Image: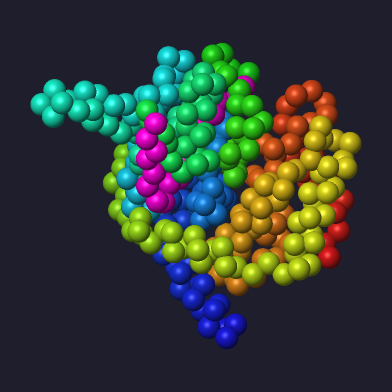
Amino acid sequence: MLETKFSILTKRAGPLDHLLAAAGKIILGKDREIRQALACLLSGGHLLIEDLPGVGKTTLAHALARLLGLNFSRIQFTSDLLPADIVGVSIYDREKAAFRFLPGPIFSELVLADEINRATPKTQSALLEAMEEQQVTVEGETRSLPKPFFVIATQNPAHQIGTFPLPESQLDRFLMRIELGYPDRLAERALLAAGGQRERADQLTAVLEASSIPALQAQAAQVHAAAPLIDYVQALIEASRQSPTFQHGLSPRAGLALLAAARSWAWLDGREMVLPDDVQEVLPAVARHRLRSIQGSGMARGEDIATLIHNVPIP
């Protein structure tokens, strides 16, 4: 029975291996970050990418949308953007003598919220409410969002001019937060020689159909987490709460996010059970934006998460 289940997992992961390889030819030298983004989607969560302009955040979103067969919309967040610009608005139709709803760009399967921290908190909340509830309410009427529904938000570093930092309660809506960073020397050399990758991303063909993604998400959610593994996750959460390094620890929702991401990471490896290594692999992306360093108001550093992992023994 275990062999049958393993073969199913491996078979299902096959197209995703092709997807990872195709995306890796567009976002050069960032295989790990691409895999993190895909694990976030399989976990049913949303992704926050925080980094400097020009390192490939938007190109990554375009590439994933094309390869996954998702209809795509981009919302450029600015200080004058209004909630109605995101969710849509009702207009009066003279011919029908009735109001007609014009859906906003939020009604897409993959939404790129570009530079989300350049919009006001009120506008940020319109997007984040949709992420949490999987629906929007306009003029008293509730409208469901498509399934799958995946938000990739990009965020410039908080020290840049004209940003409105996301508060902790809104950051918690993102299952994972990653950074792309500069490419290594070889990847950057290939990028310069090719003259950019944006046009190549637009030429990608779908590896999957959008309708297949909910089934893949369900399959990833079935990856087994044994009792000792759950004990390990709980020990990490408790250690974060007791650590003098952080202002506060991880919440139960963060623990659920950590388990979901670890299951997806294991599933991408074609395994039917979660290992402690999977938890350690995804912990930085799941936890850093949810923890605040006791030194100032900034988020936890990478070395703080590494110390947390080191201090909690594997059962």
Q: Nearer the viewer, residue 134 or 259?
A: 134
| Farthest residue, direction left | 95
| Farthest residue, direction bottom | 1
In the image, what residue occupies the spot 43% across and 59% down?
214
In the image, what residue occupies the spot 10% across and 26% down?
95
Where is the N terminus found, in terms of image quarters? bottom right
Q: Quadrant of residue 156?
A: top right
Using residue 156 as the reference point, say whether residue 291 is left or right of it.
right
Using residue 267 as the reference point, say whether residue 241 is left or right of it.
right
Camera sees residue 142: yes
Using residue 34 as the reference point, say whether residue 284 is left or right of it.
right
> What's the coloring here?
rainbow
Q: Which residues are magenta?
A: 140-158
The reply to whether the magenta stretch includes residue 241 is no
Vertical comparison of 4 with 228: above or below: below
In the image, what residue occupies the spot 57% across and 59% down?
264
Q: Quadrant of residue 179?
A: top right
Where is the C terminus found, in terms of image quarters? bottom right
Vertical comparison of 57 with 147: above or below: above
Camera sees residue 269: no
Vertical comparison of 34 with 182: above or below: below
Q: Residue 106 appears at what percent x and percent y?
A: 38, 36
In the image, what residue occupies the spot 13% across and 23% down?
94
Q: Residue 139 appears at what percent x and percent y?
A: 37, 28
Q: Nearer the viewer, residue 136 or 263?
A: 136
Vertical comparison of 125 with 106: above or below: above
Q: Residue 113 appears at what percent x and percent y?
A: 45, 32
Q: Residue 294 appears at what percent x and percent y?
A: 83, 29
Q: Nearer the viewer, residue 296 or 224?
A: 224
